[in-house]
């Protein structure tokens, strides 16, 4: 199925003249976008809970069948506000295999993130490892739906209930995904989405909090607007978490094209599966086709003893071809500052996280990538593995 091709790392011309990036933005219908932007300018209502933000919130509530969606400027601030609204303090259990913002949103408010290992089969928080980390200071758990694959929401909810902990989900990867037919956005006390440009669905910059708890939603709404409850009356410490109208316009336009984005990602993912199926030592993360997924992440686990090449050597091969593959969540939050200095021994409890961070490779997809591109990437991987000894020699010399 795969063809051998001359490799750029061994001196051939790169497969792609222009770089292919992971997380190149998906962009909806330009004319619809421009029409809405013009409307926004005509109205001179640019932020502060404008009509487009309100429309977006109602559309997302409908889509996810959730009671409350609160649009925000980004997911990091949304996490900080959700954490504050739930009155978390002391320690909160999170995975280390996540984007650094999950940890920073806690540490920023002087709450200690306690890193829990992941299940190597799902890449998500391992429910079997949580209870050993609970102390009298623990107030919550934040699960992360990594790659949009849902956490074990049932097991986490049981643990949270048993220990009277709050349960949040960082759903930055999981917009448009379901589990047991129910939309992500409905689990735990709150869920937080990111609409950053590199995410499947973007608002330039943006995010949202969803919850089915009326009182919590009301509190979060106040907190994202400095704590103002009407003119001249502040009732909480708040911050500025507001989404601008321009971002809401982009999000509404993205929403209209969401099914197209998913279809493209899914077709690319299937092509990747087909073109990598016979490659020794490469395991593609699969999605449950009976659920809704956004297929935004093409994730390969590299087994070096079978490929003859490490994950980083394969990345060097791909970069030479202008395929800008990425390591993900490498080296893990616990090996970055300030957490590395705070918890120098954290790694002893995180063997599966470290092994995963050392073998995961993420490949380009999205509407900027087509199935011919994916076929070529499959050929590159095939050729790299077929020529592993020569590639390794060049890679060691820092070959480009
Ligand atoms: C992208 C991301 C965030 C941060 O989102 P922003 O909207 O950029 O603040 C948080 N957590 C995870 C898991 C992410 O992937």
Image (tube, rainbow, N blue to C red):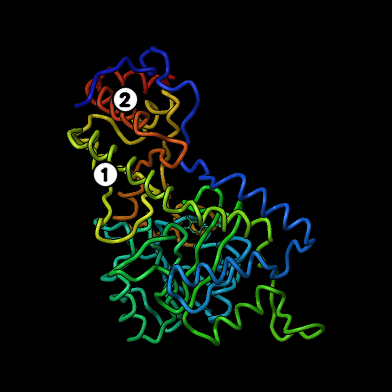
- Farthest right residue in view: 232
- Mark nearer the N terminus (1 vs 2): 1
How packed is label 2: few (under 14 Cα within 10 Å), some, or many (20 or more)?
many
Please give the residue where the numbered disc 1 appears in the rendered image: 284
Mark on residue 380? 2
Q: Quadrant of the C terminus?
A: top left
Circle 1 sits in a helix, a strand or a loop, which is it?
strand
Q: Cβ of disc 1 within 8 Å of ligand 1?
A: no
Left-right relation of 255 to 350: right
Q: Are marks 1 and 2 in contact (CB under 8 Å)?
A: no
Distance from disc 1 to disc 2, alpha carbons, whole Å, reads 16 Å
Picture coordinates of residue 40 (x, y %)? 73, 58
Residue plotted at (26% across, 50% down): 286
Residue plotted at (67% across, 51% down): 35
Residue nearest the viewer, comparing 208 with 398: 208
Residue nearest the viewer, comparing 6 with 260: 260
Number of marks in the image? Answer: 2
Q: Quadrant of residue 116?
A: bottom left
Q: Quadrant of residue 387?
A: top left
Residue plotted at (29% across, 17% down): 5
Residue nearest the viewer, comparing 21 with 349: 21
Q: Is residue 348 visible?
A: no
Circle 2 sits in a helix, a strand or a loop, which is it?
helix
Picture coordinates of residue 205 (x, y %)? 61, 54
How packed is label 1: few (under 14 Cα within 10 Å), some, or many (20 or more)?
some
Image height of 334 relative to 209, above or below: above
Residue plotted at (29% across, 70% down): 127
Image height of 32 relative to 342, above or below: above
Mark on residue 59? none
């Amino acid at each position: 199925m795969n063809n051998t091709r001359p490799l750029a790392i061994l001196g051939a011309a790169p497969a792609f003249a222009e770089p292919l990036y992971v997380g190149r933005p998906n962009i909806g219908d330009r004319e619809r976008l421009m029409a809405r932007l013009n409307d926004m300018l005509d109205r001179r209502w640019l932020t502060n809970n404008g009509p487009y933000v309100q429309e977006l919130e109602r559309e997302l509530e409908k889509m996810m069948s959730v009671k409350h969606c609160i649009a925000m400027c980004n997911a990091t601030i949304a996490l900080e506000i959700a954490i504050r609204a739930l009155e978390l303090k002391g320690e909160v259990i999170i995975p280390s295999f996540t984007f650094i913002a999950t940890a920073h949103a806690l540490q920023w408010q002087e709450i200690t993130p306690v890193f829990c290992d992941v299940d190597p089969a799902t890449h998500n928080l391992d429910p079997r490892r949580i209870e050993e980390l609970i102390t009298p200071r623990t107030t919550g758990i934040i699960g992360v739906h990594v790659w949009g694959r849902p956490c074990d929401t049932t097991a986490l909810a049981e643990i949270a209930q048993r220990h009277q902990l709050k349960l949040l989900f960082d759903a930055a990867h999981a917009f448009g995904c379901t589990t047991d037919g129910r939309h992500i956005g409905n689990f735990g006390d709150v869920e937080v989405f990111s609409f950053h440009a590199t995410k499947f669905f973007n608002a330039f910059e943006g995010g949202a909090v969803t919850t089915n708890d009326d009182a919590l939603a009301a509190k979060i709404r106040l907190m994202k607007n400095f704590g103002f409850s009407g003119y001249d009356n502040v009732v909480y410490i708040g911050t500025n978490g507001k989404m601008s109208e321009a971002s809401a316009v982009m999000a509404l336009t993205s929403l209209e094209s969401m099914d197209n984005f998913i279809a493209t990602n899914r077709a690319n993912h299937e092509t990747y599966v087909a073109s990598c199926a016979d490659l020794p030592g490469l395991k593609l993360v699969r999605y449950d086709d009976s659920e809704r997924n956004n297929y935004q992440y093409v994730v390969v686990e590299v087994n070096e003893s079978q490929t003859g090449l490490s994950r980083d050597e394969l990345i060097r091969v791909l970069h030479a071809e202008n395929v800008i593959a990425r390591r993900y969540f490498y080296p893990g939050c616990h090996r970055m500052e300030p957490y590395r200095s705070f918890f120098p021994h954290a790694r002893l409890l995180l063997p599966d996280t470290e092994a995963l961070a050392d073998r995961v490779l993420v490949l380009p997809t999205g509407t900027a990538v087509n199935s011919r591109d994916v076929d070529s990437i499959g050929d590159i991987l095939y050729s790299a593995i077929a020529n592993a000894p020569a590639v390794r020699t060049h890679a060691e010399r820092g070959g480009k």
